Structures are given as structure tokens and as C-alpha cells.
Image (cartoon, grey):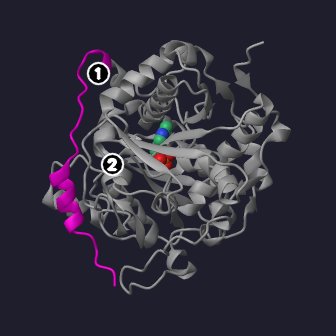
């Protein structure tokens, strides 16, 4: 029998997160205080995050227990299915085996609730009343709004203005879960007012929206900040994906030769890949790991590995990462979740030490891959996930060319049911590719902070 779906029982769900810091040959460079240039300590982060999350941010323990209350909410949609893409394999005529982990079954339609739920839980435990955050395409805002509803926290979401206009259904979902949604840049913060004074028609960016949310949290003792990607604790929470995939591939009697994930800030990629990279770092099993990013926002393939701010208003610590410059505003591609100027420090570090590879994909190629996938497998991927699909198809075709039957695993990090206008534009021939915005990136990089 040709099994296509590998399902775990609730009892097989992981009970701890996997922390890759335990297996790294050397720790990544530490975050620095922008004023002093010295490594930051827990006290510097305390105005924004609860202590349990700060501890996770700096932990080097390999396994960190998932609280029972968090596991309970996870069980509403976890463990998620792993599929063998037999019909896609046939369509491609490849001897490769293609597996994908499907995170679109969560209530928000992506992997993001995997971290939204524990973040809300730890904040609630710490007595926090309200969470402030940003959202690009609306996936993260929806996930935190959901988590706020589950644990009784108010949520305010600064939504990048262009998405606020383009994605009314994402906004409605957040508001249905009880969150307040504000178009960013807004006149509710200093950071927003400053941008509006200089650029009254600004359509916003993730970097600007982060500045607004951080400012709101820093000014109010009852409000904390929550970030949906980039930070170590966020990547940690996502490792339930890869741990489940490991067990499911065992059921299938397989192990990946190649893992592919798309990268915006790096969290879903890390979620699927870190447990396997850990096994590689411990010398147990080898694996090739490929990050796929949009050519219009190519932080890993064209950015500089340097200390930079996480936001446009320069309120965050300096982190060493592959960056396009904190003032770079990427072209308006439809994969809104991949339009961030930087990359998670852990992912940047892994690229720097040669443990992962990175490729960039053009928008039209990503959508072509997504449509081919939908027609073969019957699942419509999010525009972000299309980059992973394109990466997996490229690997499968390389196997065909070489006559090699490798095993490919990729993360289908979300569905695209809220992104149908992007698919409509694609099918109407209205989408375009963007050249590497070399001049704008050079300008933004000229503004990198100097670090002694
Ligand atoms: C947010 C998002 C991304 C990008 O964020 P990562 O932290 O890189 O995972 C990718 N895909 C989907 C579906 C998203 O919602």
C-alpha cells in the first residue's frame, strides 16, 4: 500500500522543545546594548519579556519542558500530519521521495501558533495584562490574537499599512479573536509619528511596525512585547515541527538527505531543521539543509553578516545577523511574511559556520511552484510556503537529472486561503519579478551601526 499520510497520536506529541544551543560548536555572537556596545543582560530585556522567556533566550539546556497548559492547547491541532507527496513526485517524474510537514492545520493556518501559545502563557503567568506586537501579512497577528483569547490577554497588533489595506480578512480574523489592530505607521507612537512626518504616504514595513509595538510595551508596565520570529525562544518553540517529523519519518522507514524551508525571520525553517541539524552536529546523521528566501528580500544570499538593529526606529538591541540594513524597505511582494530586513541570529550563525545553505527564488517561480503543488497535492500553500515548495521541486529535479533517489523533506508552513487575491493576480498575469534592489540595499547598509 502506498501510504501518503503519517499521523501521530496525541501521546506521541513532543513534551519538550529542542534547544540547538546545546549542540553548537561555539555560541553565536551575543546581542549588544546599542548605547554601551556591551552584551545585554536579562535586566535589559525585562521591560519587554517575561523572565521565563528571557531564560529560554539564553539557555544552553538541550531539552526544555513544554508546560502542560501549553501542550493542552497544542493538542487542538498537533501533532500535525506528514505527507508523502506521491502525486507531485509522479508529476515531476523524479526518483526522489518528497515528504512535507503540514503546519496549515493550525487555527491561524500556519506554524506561528506554536510560539504564540507559549508566549501568551508565560506572559499570563507573569501577571502581564496586554501584549503588543507587529504583523506583516497578518499570520503572526492572527496567531497572537488567538493565543490572547486562549489565555485571557489583551492584544494590540501594529499591522503594516499595505497589508492592512490588502488583507481585510486577516484583520477581521484578529478582531474576531478580540485583538485591536492599528495600521502602521500610525500616530499612536513616537516612532510612527516620526516616519509619518518624513514620509506621509509610507505604506509601512515590518521594521517600522516592530518599533511601534516595542515602544508601546516599553512605556507601559502592564504591556509586554511579543515577536513572531527571529529570537532564540521563538525558534525553540517551533522545534515541535521537526521532532514530530523525525518520528513520522521513522514510521515511514526514512530519513531526509535534504531539508528545505522558507525563511523570513527564520522560525519555521528552524522548527523543521534544528532537530536534524542537532543530530548532524552530534555526529549521528548527515543532512543537507537549504533555506529559501525571496530574491526581492535576500538577507541570507545577498546581505551582510554584521551587527544591526532589529527595527527601523532603532529601539531594539544590536544583533549579529545577515541583514539588508534596518532602513531597507523591501519591494511589495505577496509573500509578506518574508519581507524582513534581517535573519534570526541562530540561522545566520549556522550559515556562517557552513551548516546550512541558502538560495533565493523569484516571485513568479515561487507561485508557479505553488500552483503545480496545489494541482498535484490538493493543498493551496501560503505565498511564503511557495518558496519552500520551489526549493523542494528544484532538489527533486536535480535528483531526476542525476538519477538519484534521495529523500527530501520540506515544511509546508501554512495554507494560502487568506491570500487568494495574490493567486488571482498571479493567474491574471499581474505579478512581476523584482531585480535585486542593489542600490537601496547599499544605501541601507551604509547606515549599519559601528560596533567596536
Ligand atoms: C510568518 C511566516 C513565514 C516567515 O516567518 P519565519 O519566521 O521565517 O517562519 C513563513 N511562512 C508563513 C506561512 C508565515 O506565516
Residue 220 locus on image (x, y percent)? 47, 70
Kindly report which numbered mark, 1 or 2, lies closer to the viewer in this rendering: 2
The reply to whether residue 80 is in sight is yes
Q: Are marks 1 and 2 in contact (CB under 8 Å)?
A: no
The quarter of the image holding the C terminus is: bottom left
Residue 298's disc is: 2
**Label 1 belongs to which residue?**
425
Residue 190 locus on image (x, y percent)? 28, 67
Q: CA distance from mark 1 to mark 2?
A: 23 Å
Residue at image position (62%, 49%) is 238
Tell me the magenta residue range.
426-452
Image position of 358 with respect to 419: above or below: below
Q: Nearer the viewer, residue 346 or 78?
A: 346
Image position of 87 with respect to 28: above or below: above
Q: Nearer the viewer, residue 177 or 415?
A: 415
Residue 147 locus on image (x, y percent)? 61, 47
Image position of 431 with respect to 22: above or below: above
Amino acid at each position: 500500500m502506498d501510504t501518503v499520510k503519517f499521523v501521530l497520536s496525541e501521546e506521541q506529541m513532543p513534551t519538550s522543545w529542542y534547544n540547538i544551543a546545546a549542540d553548537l560548536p561555539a555560541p553565536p555572537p551575543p546581542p549588544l546594548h546599542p548605547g554601551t556596545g556591551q552584551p545585554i543582560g536579562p535586566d535589559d530585556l525585562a521591560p519587554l519579556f517575561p523572565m521565563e522567556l528571557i531564560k529560554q533566550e539564553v539557555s544552553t539546556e538541550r531539552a526544555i519542558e513544554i508546560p502542560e497548559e501549553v501542550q493542552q492547547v497544542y493538542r487542538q491541532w498537533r501533532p500535525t500530519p506528514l505527507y508523502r507527496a506521491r502525486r507531485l513526485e509522479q508529476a515531476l517524474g523524479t526518483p526522489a521521495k518528497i515528504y512535507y510537514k503540514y503546519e496549515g492545520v493550525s487555527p491561524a493556518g500556519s506554524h506561528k501558533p506554536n510560539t504564540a501559545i507559549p508566549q501568551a502563557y508565560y506572559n499570563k503567568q507573569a501577571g502581564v495584562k496586554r501584549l503588543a506586537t507587529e504583523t506583516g501579512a497578518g499570520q503572526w497577528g492572527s496567531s497572537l490574537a488567538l493565543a490572547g483569547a486562549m489565555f485571557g490577554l489583551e492584544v494590540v497588533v501594529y499591522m503594516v499599512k499595505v497589508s492592512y489595506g490588502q488583507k481585510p480578512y486577516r484583520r477581521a480574523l484578529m478582531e474576531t479573536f478580540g485583538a485591536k489592530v492599528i495600521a502602521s505607521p500610525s500616530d499612536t507612537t513616537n516612532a510612527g509619528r516620526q516616519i509619518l512626518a518624513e514620509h506621509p504616504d509610507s505604506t509601512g514595513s515590518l521594521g517600522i511596525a516592530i518599533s511601534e509595538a516595542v515602544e508601546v510595551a516599553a512605556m507601559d508596565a502592564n504591556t509586554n512585547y511579543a515577536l513572531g520570529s527571529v529570537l532564540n525562544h521563538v525558534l525553540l518553540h517551533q522545534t515541535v515541527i521537526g521532532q514530530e517529523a523525525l518520528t513520522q519519518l521513522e514510521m515511514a522507514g526514512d530519513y531526509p538527505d535534504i531539508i528545505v524551508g522558507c525563511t523570513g525571520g527564520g522560525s519555521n525553517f528552524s522548527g523543521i531543521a534544528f532537530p536534524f541539524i542537532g543530530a548532524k552536529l552530534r555526529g549521528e546523521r548527515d543532512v543537507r539543509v537549504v533555506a529559501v528566501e525571496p530574491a526581492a528580500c535576500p538577507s541570507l544570499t545577498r546581505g551582510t553578516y554584521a551587527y544591526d538593529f532589529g527595527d527601523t526606529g532603532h529601539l531594539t538591541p544590536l544583533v549579529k545577523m545577515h541583514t539588508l540594513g534596518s532602513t531597507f524597505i523591501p519591494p511589495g511582494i505577496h509573500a509578506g511574511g518574508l519581507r524582513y530586513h534581517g535573519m534570526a541570529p541562530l540561522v545566520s550563525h549556522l550559515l556562517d559556520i557552513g551548516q546550512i545553505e541558502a538560495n533565493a527564488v523569484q516571485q513568479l517561480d515561487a507561485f508557479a511552484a505553488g500552483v503545480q503543488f496545489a494541482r498535484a497535492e490538493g493543498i493551496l500553500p501560503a505565498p511564503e510556503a511557495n518558496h519552500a515548495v520551489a526549493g523542494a521541486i528544484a532538489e527533486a529535479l536535480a535528483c531526476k537529472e542525476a538519477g538519484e533517489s534521495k529523500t527530501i523533506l520540506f515544511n509546508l508552513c501554512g495554507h494560502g486561503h487568506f491570500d487568494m487575491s495574490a493567486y488571482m493576480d498571479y493567474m491574471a498575469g499581474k505579478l512581476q519579478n523584482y531585480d535585486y534592489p542593489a542600490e537601496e540595499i547599499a544605501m541601507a547598509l551604509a547606515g549599519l551601526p559601528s560596533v567596536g
